[in-house]
Amino acid sequence: MSAFWLFILVLALSATGFVLGRARAMKDAGGDIRRLHSLPSYYGSNVMLSTLIPGLFVLVAWLIMQPIILQTQIAAMIPDTAFEDAGGLNLILSDVRRVALGLDAAVSQGVISVQDMRALSSGDDVRGLLGSVGVAVGSQISAFVLDAARAYRSQSDVAHWLMTALTLGVSFIGFVLALKATSRTARARNKVETVVRTLLLAAASLAVLTTVGIVFSLLFNTIEFFKLYPASEFFFGTTWAPSFGGGSELGVLPLFWGTFYISIIALLVAVPIGLFAAIYLSEYAGPKTRAFAKPLLEVLAGIPTIVYGLFALLTVGPMLVSLFGDAGMLGVDWMAGGRAVITAGLVMGVMLIPFVSSLSDDIINAVPQAMRDGSLGLGATPSETIKQVVLPAALPGIVGAILLAASRAIGETMIVVLGAGAAAQLDMNPFAAMTTVTTRIVSQLTGDADFSSPEALVAFALGMTLFVITLGLNVIALVIVRKYREQYD
């Protein structure tokens, strides 16, 4: 049984448990809800959670562990002489999985029987069989690959049956035990609230553990990179020239210069426009105008970044060339091509406008109305009230919003790829092409490079450095907001 239908069955059993648990509690109370310790829905929820949670836990754990265990068992069947390193073994295991998938499809479609499938021994016969069911295998099918594929298919079938039996069994046991324990005196509400509190704690812990996992996944590969390449040359080198054939110069300064240069231009666009829009929406716009303008402005936040990148490539870049190019309207020769720092910065700034505007609007609205009324009562005009009362009170939060927007700008990729070019250089010219850290990470991990080479591992060092910088900006933003935020009654 597939995991999807198994999930549906567990859901159906838990829904049945809710109905029966509620009915059993009411029956035990003689139909009088006042005799129950908890509300009837708590009794149903107790049976439902006792059925659902164990079953889903077993299902998820099995789906995570099954591929790991199967791959370990199948890897033991591959001769050591068939591969040179871990990458070669992974390619062979990928072929094994594809062959097993093709054999399973051939049997399920009736192209071949199970007995005939077990009798196959020729790689050419297997290739033709797989081609008939639409499964392509890139390399020659060896005898050990075919044997491993048959073993993989057989073990997968057994694992699926065990998963089905264990998941349904655990769910049914929880269903029976919880339903049997249901009575009018049972403390169902306490149990349900404890389970819900535990689930909330688990969700919060999962978020923290995910962050820790990301850090460690970057950290170990970063350490491996610095074993192969000097840290001083990486952090202080002024030349970025990776060469997968050897002799690479991996100085990170040009990449970070491009990253910060583009981000600064983006913030110069986004902060004034976003802040002024927030002031207008919160202080001047009427309810109807605000109800129309704020959602319309926030539509920009929902546009995919690839669309912004295409906008930079096809519209903004050519427009800037027509102004600042050799044959442009201004008669200057500053911009040779559409891909430049200013192109990516302008478009990224437009993308950040709703981010700055929405956060600033919420922060300004959080300033108590009593402060505005007091200022106006003392004779100040609305504009003076905004400048001298509202903005100073909201300034810490606005600064935090700007720093969060800066973190968002630093991590952007697609706009830079399509709008800024790929030149790693230290240049003050905003009309020159440059690149950023994120685009180089994508570039270094794309292709068939040896994963153990410094040219590939440098992507993790770049990612770790960028993570530390953005984390620092976020921490600074939180410190500013918490330290200088005024508490109002």
Image (cartoon, grey):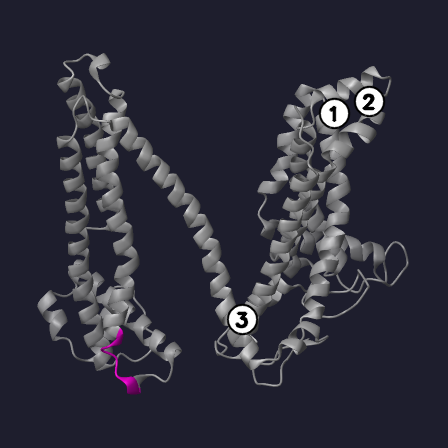
Residue at image location 14% in from the left, 46% down from the top? 169
Marks 1 & 3, CB-CB < 8 Å contact: no
Q: Locate residue 426: give its quadrant.
A: bottom right
Q: Which residues are magenta?
A: 75-81
Q: Report the front residue among 123 and 5.
A: 5
Q: Distance from label 1 to label 3 (Cα)?
A: 49 Å
Left or right: 162, with 253 as reference point:
left
Q: Nearer the viewer, residue 451 or 150?
A: 451
Left-right relation of 327 to 252? right
Q: Earlier in the sequence, mark 1 or mark 2?
A: 1
Q: Secondary structure at mark 1?
A: helix
**Kind of residue indicated by mark 1:** Glu
**Mark 2 surroundings: few (<14), some (14-19) or many (≥20) residues within 10 A:** some
Residue under label 3 = 222
Q: Examine the image and state in which quarter residue 433 appears.
A: bottom right
Q: Is residue 469 above or below residue 207?
A: below
* Label 1 – label 2 distance at C-alpha: 9 Å
Secondary structure of the residue carrying tag 3 is helix
Q: Are marks 1 and 2 in contact (CB under 8 Å)?
A: yes
Q: Which residue is mark 1?
A: 283
